[in-house]
Image (cartoon, rainbow, N blue to C red):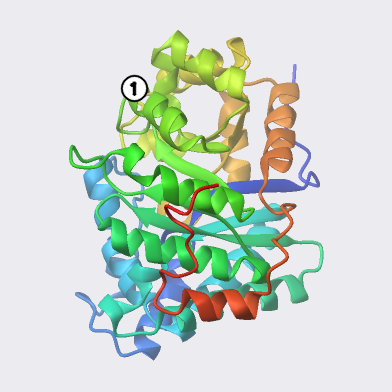
Amino acid sequence: MPRPRLDPRTPLTELHVHLGAAVTPAIMWGIAHAQGIRLPTKDYWAFRELITVGRRRRGFAAYLELFHWTELIQSSPTAVERSVYEVIGGAYRKNNVTQIELRFNPMKRNRGGEQDLDHIIAAALRGMDRAVLEYPQVRAGLIFCLDRGFSRELNEIIAAKAIAWQSRGVVGIDMAGPVSDRFHFADYAEIFAACRRAGLGLTVHAGETGGPDEVRAALEALEPDRIGHGVRAADDPDVLAMLRERGTVLEVCPSSNLNTRVLSSVPDVRRTIRALVDHDVRFTISTDGPEMLRSYLRDEFGMLLRHEILSLEEVERAIAVGTEASFLDRAPTIESSVSRRDEAGNGRAAMPIGAGS
């Protein structure tokens, strides 16, 4: 009996893809040389190994190290515009991705304040506009990543910029970065609430390297619409029940989790995803970063079908959940983008923190 296969004409939605992990090495090589960035190698193939995982298992810390070079190379308005443009167009051409939410931290693209943050953001939106103009079948939006390693003040600026640029195509915020004992989700409840009131979607990296208690803490403190990864929730039936009751969607990235050793093996992926299915937890499938991980969205679905982790019907349901859970249809608030960008100025005034609901 032939193995079930996803129709290649099926339009796909990708909700969890990092800009720093989504540009082809060849394009990154060209961007780096155009900017005169001194790379540790003058050999393209060595460079390709430097910014991709290949077939090697690296672990989570080593995976994050790959972003050092990709974020540095993307740290100018020209580089950001080209990167966003190439990712959106490439996803459509290679995988028929017709809805995509691309996430990045704009402060990690402004060289420590050397570049103006609004110029970085405007460039990203220009790249997005160019891509959807060329491919009118595609809908796209940007998600700004806050970082656990940043101060609250810096993260507040990023959130303010997300609100200020919402009407131009910023659709949500995320909390990313390595788990730290010094970080507490509750410290960001007001910032996330302000973004929710402004109409932005909320997603949070949790339950990746952290356990199910991290997912619980994120749900209770921030009330996100979606959880990035969230696979460790499968270890606790009570957390799975919380996800089901709240309707929170998990953005599951199977190949990424295997590569970072968050999940140890294909059987571990099966156990995890079947737990989500069995507990009626809504989830969608993403790559995390197709070029860095050398795995495209159709590869992810193919792997799940090949190993009989999901049936074709369940794959189609995961695709539908992604479309339903997208932030792209959220209407921006009435306040004009121009006035809000003026208020954002230094990144603080636009955030109604502490002003009550």
Q: Disc 1 marks which residue?
A: 213
Residue 252 picture location, percent across and down: 51, 34
Tag 1's secondary structure? helix
* In the image: residue 177, left or right of residue 334: left
* In the image: residue 343, left or right of residue 75: right
Which of the pair 60/117 is nearer the observer? 117
For the N terminus, the image quarter is top right
Q: Residues within 10 Å of mark 1 (few under 14, many from 20)?
A: some
Which of the pair 2/131 is nearer the observer? 131
Which of the pair 290/110 is nearer the observer? 110
Q: Relative to residue 164, is residue 231 depicted above or below?
A: above
Residue 91 picture location, percent across and down: 63, 59
**Amino acid carrying mark 1 in the image:** Asp
Q: Relative to residue 5, is residue 202 depicted above or below?
A: below
Residue 351 picture location, percent across and down: 47, 62
Q: At 28% from the left edge and 52% from the top edge, which residue is drawn?
A: 64
Q: Is residue 13 visible?
A: yes
Q: Relative to residue 348, is residue 233 depicted above or below?
A: above
